[in-house]
């Protein structure tokens, strides 16, 4: 039987695909049991490449016993994202199965779909935007800003006409104080990072939780824009960079998916047709976490 090749992994500047990379490296080193274990962990949270590679390992008996019905079931699950090569391999497996074995394979595929299909995982794991139910308390608090501190535009950068933005993520504690600020995205480089951290650390909020909800820290994000009034050029630059990030996100880069979720939700600078609402923000965050 002609050997099938696993999907190769891509190396990025940041370790956004560390788990998939580790599994692929284990496979390349012929550590098939370890590779099987890691691909299985990724496959059950919806990683399509891992599902494909797991199917091939069942097909070729690498890290596990050869099992054509399992190979068929996992590959059919991966086929949710249409791939002509998948269909060719599925047809090859079908040709090797008896009618009884094919029935078993289809039943296994149905069970996997009910547990690990994209739609099923989204319903189980995706963050959701809570509806306003009058008879059930919301875990999301009402958030009110009661004190702002404007970031200091670094004099050297101001004189040079520099522009940029920084997206900061942080936790708001029940007493309204800001904790654990960190940079989610910044442009250009880290020029405005520290002044953004310094500013957000001084902000004060008021959190109001519904009755019956135990107060706890709440995650939030804030984007600071460093520019000049009516600077259309900067807005164009923002949207141009947003398009680059979106393209990377669509290709499966988990870091880009996370940054795009935040950056495309800034109404002041995102073109109306490119602005995304909270439900779509949540979907991108889910895809990022899944990868």
Image (cartoon, grey):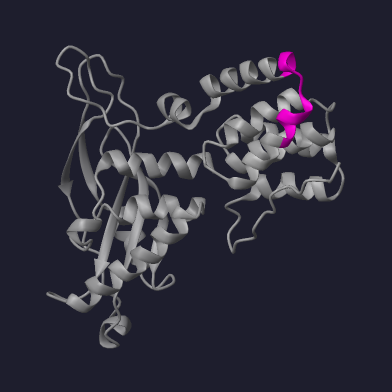
User: In the picture provided, is 158 more to the left or to the right than 144?
Assistant: right
Question: In the image, what residue occupies the spot 58% across and 59% down?
Answer: 14
**Does the image show residue 194?**
no
Query: In which quadrant is the C terminus drawn?
Result: top right
In percent of width and height, residue 146 lies at 15, 45
Q: Quadrant of residue 107?
A: top right
In percent of width and height, residue 142 lies at 18, 32
Question: In the image, what residue occupies the spot 41% across and 32% down?
Answer: 126
> Looking at this view, is 154 or 71 the one in front?
71
Question: In the image, what residue occupies the spot 20% across and 62% down?
Answer: 271
User: In the picture provided, is 240 more to the left or to the right than 91?
Assistant: left
**Does the image show residue 59?**
yes
Query: In which quadrant is the N terminus drawn?
Result: top right
> Looking at this view, is 213 or 88 the one in front?
88
Q: Is residue 25 above or below residue 137?
A: below
> Looking at this view, is 105 or 130 the one in front?
105
Any magenta on residue 94?
A: yes
The secondary structure making up most of the magenta span is: helix
Any magenta on residue 7?
A: no
Q: Quadrant of residue 159?
A: bottom left
> Looking at this view, is 101 or 107 the one in front?
101
Spot the residue most to the bottom: 160
In percent of width and height, residue 197 lies at 36, 59
Question: In the image, what residue occupies the spot 63% across and 20% down?
Answer: 106
Q: Is residue 64 above or below residue 261?
A: above
The magenta span reads 92-101
User: In the picture provided, is 207 more to the left or to the right than 215?
Assistant: left
Give the mark count.
0
In percent of width and height, residue 207 lies at 22, 33
């Amino acid at each position: 039987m002609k050997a099938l090749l696993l999907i190769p992994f891509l190396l990025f500047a940041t370790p956004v695909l560390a788990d998939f990379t580790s599994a692929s490296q284990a496979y390349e080193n012929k550590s098939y049991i370890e590779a099987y274990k890691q691909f299985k962990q990724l496959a059950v949270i919806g990683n399509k490449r891992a599902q494909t590679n797991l199917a091939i390992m069942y097909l070729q008996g690498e890290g596990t016993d050869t099992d054509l019905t399992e190979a068929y079931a996992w590959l059919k699950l991966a086929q949710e994202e249409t791939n002509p090569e998948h269909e060719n391999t599925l047809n090859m497996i079908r040709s090797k199965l008896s009618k009884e074995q094919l029935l078993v394979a289809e039943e296994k595929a149905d069970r996997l779909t009910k547990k690990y299909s994209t739609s099923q995982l989204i319903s189980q794991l995706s963050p959701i935007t809570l509806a306003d139910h009058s008879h059930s308390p919301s875990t999301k608090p009402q958030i009110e800003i009661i004190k702002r501190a404007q970031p200091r535009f670094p004099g050297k950068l101001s004189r040079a006409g520099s522009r940029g933005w920084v997206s900061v993520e942080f936790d708001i504690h029940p007493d309204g104080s800001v904790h654990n600020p960190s940079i989610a995205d910044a442009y250009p480089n880290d020029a405005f990072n520290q002044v953004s951290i310094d500013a957000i650390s001084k902000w004060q909020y008021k959190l109001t939780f519904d009755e019956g909800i135990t107060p706890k820290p709440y995650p939030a994000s804030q984007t600071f824009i460093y520019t000049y009034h009516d600077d259309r050029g900067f807005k164009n630059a923002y949207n141009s960079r947003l398009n680059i990030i979106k393209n990377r996100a669509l290709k499966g880069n988990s870091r880009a998916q996370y940054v795009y979720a935040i950056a495309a939700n800034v109404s002041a600078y995102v073109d109306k047709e490119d602005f995304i609402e909270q439900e779509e923000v949540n979907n991108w965050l889910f895809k990022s976490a899944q990868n």
